[in-house]
Image (cartoon, helix red, strand yellow):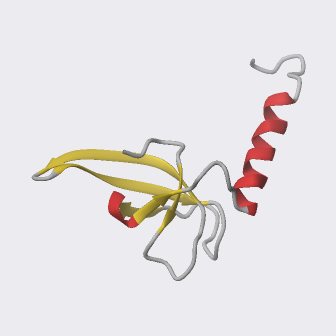
Amino acid sequence: MYHTGDFVYPTDLPRRFLCRVTEEESFPVETGTAQILKLAPLEGPWPEGTLLVRPDVWVRAARRGSPTAGLRDLLAQERRAAARPKGRGQAA
Protein backbone atom coordinates (compact mmCIF):
# COMPACT_ATOMS: atom_id res chain seq x y z
CA MET A 1 0.00 0.00 0.00
CA TYR A 2 1.24 3.45 -0.89
CA HIS A 3 0.61 6.57 1.19
CA THR A 4 0.71 10.30 0.56
CA GLY A 5 4.34 11.43 0.66
CA ASP A 6 5.81 8.12 -0.53
CA PHE A 7 8.44 8.28 -3.28
CA VAL A 8 7.82 6.04 -6.30
CA TYR A 9 8.84 5.42 -9.90
CA PRO A 10 6.16 4.83 -12.56
CA THR A 11 7.07 1.59 -14.36
CA ASP A 12 5.34 2.37 -17.67
CA LEU A 13 7.81 5.10 -18.69
CA PRO A 14 10.96 4.58 -20.79
CA ARG A 15 13.21 5.38 -17.81
CA ARG A 16 12.88 5.99 -14.08
CA PHE A 17 11.44 9.38 -13.07
CA LEU A 18 11.12 9.98 -9.36
CA CYS A 19 7.64 11.01 -8.19
CA ARG A 20 5.96 11.71 -4.87
CA VAL A 21 2.49 10.36 -4.10
CA THR A 22 0.19 13.34 -3.55
CA GLU A 23 -3.10 11.44 -3.24
CA GLU A 24 -4.16 7.82 -3.01
CA GLU A 25 -7.53 6.19 -3.28
CA SER A 26 -7.98 2.59 -2.17
CA PHE A 27 -10.85 0.33 -3.12
CA PRO A 28 -11.64 -3.37 -2.80
CA VAL A 29 -11.15 -5.70 -5.76
CA GLU A 30 -11.62 -9.44 -6.05
CA THR A 31 -7.99 -10.15 -5.17
CA GLY A 32 -7.67 -7.67 -2.27
CA THR A 33 -7.18 -3.91 -2.37
CA ALA A 34 -6.15 -1.73 -5.31
CA GLN A 35 -5.10 1.91 -5.40
CA ILE A 36 -5.23 4.80 -7.82
CA LEU A 37 -2.33 7.18 -7.17
CA LYS A 38 -1.79 10.81 -8.10
CA LEU A 39 1.92 11.44 -8.54
CA ALA A 40 3.89 14.69 -8.64
CA PRO A 41 6.99 14.22 -10.81
CA LEU A 42 10.13 15.50 -9.06
CA GLU A 43 12.23 15.13 -12.20
CA GLY A 44 11.65 14.61 -15.88
CA PRO A 45 10.20 16.50 -18.84
CA TRP A 46 6.92 17.66 -17.24
CA PRO A 47 6.18 21.29 -16.39
CA GLU A 48 5.86 22.20 -12.71
CA GLY A 49 2.43 21.36 -11.34
CA THR A 50 1.95 18.27 -13.50
CA LEU A 51 0.21 15.31 -11.86
CA LEU A 52 0.42 11.78 -13.21
CA VAL A 53 -2.29 9.24 -12.39
CA ARG A 54 -1.33 5.57 -12.14
CA PRO A 55 -2.73 2.37 -10.67
CA ASP A 56 -0.59 0.98 -7.85
CA VAL A 57 0.60 -1.92 -10.02
CA TRP A 58 2.24 0.59 -12.40
CA VAL A 59 4.59 2.07 -9.79
CA ARG A 60 7.53 0.81 -7.77
CA ALA A 61 8.64 2.21 -4.42
CA ALA A 62 11.84 4.24 -4.42
CA ARG A 63 14.25 2.68 -1.93
CA ARG A 64 15.43 5.06 0.78
CA GLY A 65 18.85 3.39 0.91
CA SER A 66 19.80 4.36 -2.65
CA PRO A 67 18.24 7.71 -3.51
CA THR A 68 18.53 9.23 -6.96
CA ALA A 69 19.94 12.70 -7.40
CA GLY A 70 16.39 14.10 -7.46
CA LEU A 71 15.48 12.44 -4.18
CA ARG A 72 18.78 13.48 -2.57
CA ASP A 73 18.19 17.11 -3.62
CA LEU A 74 14.60 17.08 -2.36
CA LEU A 75 15.53 15.56 0.99
CA ALA A 76 18.36 18.07 1.39
CA GLN A 77 15.96 20.96 0.68
CA GLU A 78 13.48 19.62 3.23
CA ARG A 79 16.24 19.27 5.86
CA ARG A 80 17.42 22.85 5.22
CA ALA A 81 13.86 24.19 5.46
CA ALA A 82 13.26 22.32 8.73
CA ALA A 83 16.54 23.60 10.20
CA ARG A 84 15.85 27.25 9.29
CA PRO A 85 14.97 29.27 12.40
CA LYS A 86 11.56 30.91 12.31
CA GLY A 87 11.72 34.70 12.30
CA ARG A 88 9.45 36.99 14.27
CA GLY A 89 5.93 37.07 12.97
CA GLN A 90 6.23 33.70 11.24
CA ALA A 91 4.08 30.81 12.29
CA ALA A 92 5.87 27.93 13.94
Q: Is residue 68 above or below residue 33?
A: below
Of the pair 30 and 52, the residue shown nearer to us: 30
Q: Is residue 49 above or below residue 13?
A: above
Q: Residue at x 63, y 48 (%)?
A: 64
**Horizontal and vertical percent position of residue 28:** 16, 46
- Furthest toward the bottom, the residue is 14
**Horizontal and vertical percent position of residue 20:** 55, 53
- Furthest toward the left, the residue is 30
Q: Residue at x 38, y 66 (%)?
A: 58
Q: Quadrant of residue 67?
A: bottom right
Q: Residue at x 68, y 56 (%)?
A: 66
Figure label count? 0
**Horizontal and vertical percent position of residue 69:** 75, 62
Q: Quadrant of the C terminus?
A: top right
- Furthest toward the front, the residue is 65
Q: Is residue 35 left or right of residue 3?
A: left
Q: Residue at x 80, y 45 (%)?
A: 77
Q: Is residue 16 above or below residue 35?
A: below
Q: Is residue 34 left or right of residue 90?
A: left
Q: Quadrant of the N terminus?
A: top left
Q: Is residue 31 left or right of residue 82?
A: left
**Horizontal and vertical percent position of residue 74:** 73, 50
Of the pair 64 and 84, the residue shown nearer to us: 64
